[in-house]
Image (cartoon, grey):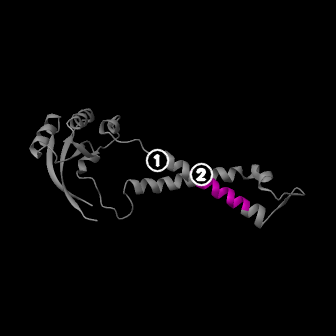
Amino acid sequence: MASTNQTIINALYDDDDVLLSGVKQVREKGLEIQEVYSPFPVHGLDKAMGLKETRIAIAAFLYGTLGLATAISLTYGMMIVDWPLNIGGKPSFSWGENMPAFVPIMFELTVFFAAHLMVWTFFFRNKIYPGAKAQNPDPRTTDDKFLMEVVAGGDHSNEDIMALLKETGAIEVSVNSAEHA
């Protein structure tokens, strides 16, 4: 994979309402916002940035379905095929007749698979796996500041973008050259 150098302009804000307004103004000008860093969730920021709806619920459903299929396979294999039990003098060699006894196992494995695989999906999707390089460009965003990264280029010069960001209420604007794979 070839890496490309992109110029990123960082705008630091001290208020979430000013940030939200700034994001809307920057998007109206047709600029690409690469990322916004915030110490807490800002209501409406995802829509203002134009982010797509997440498909994470589909992944959770599929993981739960995998857990349910695993539970059905395990209960059938262990309790019907491998080690059938004579319960109350009435041997039963079908999974359907014994299914009510397996409901807790099926529920627990469904939840177990969905929860644990969702944690791994979260780590993978957010690139916070072991050994990952920290991506936060300014440690102040973990305390009380907000940072918007705008991709420079296109029809706008760096100076125009920086002036726009200052107009939106940014308290600090800086230019960084970021290397992206």
Residue reaching furthest to the front: 155
Residue 34 placed where, x, y %?
Answer: 26, 47
Q: Is residue 104 left or right of residue 33?
A: right
Quadrant position of residue 48: top left
Which one is nearer the viewer's eye here, 110 or 181? 181
Q: Please state the extent of the stretch shown in magenta in the rendering.
A: 64-76
Toward the viewer: 78 or 160? 160
Residue type pointed to by label 1 = Ile
Q: Residue 153 — which label?
A: none
Residue position for label 2: 65
**Residue 71 colored in magenta in the image:** yes
Q: Is residue 133 magenta?
A: no
> Is residue 93 or residue 10 the one in the foreground?
93
x, y percentage for residue 100? Answer: 76, 49
Of labels 2 and 1, earlier in sequence is: 1
Q: Position of residue 168 (x, y in %)?
A: 17, 34
Q: CA distance from mark 2 to mark 1?
A: 14 Å
Count how many numbered circles sit on residues in the image: 2
Identify residue type, mark 2: Thr
| Farthest right residue in view | 89
**Dividing the picture into quarters, in which one does residue 19 lie?**
top left
Q: Is residue 147 visible?
A: no
Binning the other alpha carbons within 10 Å of mark 1 as few (below 14), some (14 to 19) or many (20 upward) gives few
Tell me if mark 2 has few (under 14), some (14-19) or many (20+) residues whose alpha carbon lies within 10 angstroms of its own: some
Name which residue lies at 21% across and 37% down: 26
Q: Which residue is mark 1?
A: 56
* Residue drawn 19% across the image and 47% down it: 10
Image position, residue 93 (x, y; %):
82, 59
Look at the picture and state if 53 lies above or below 181.
above
Secondary structure type for disc 2: helix
* Picture quarter with the C terminus: bottom left
Q: Secondary structure at mark 1?
A: helix
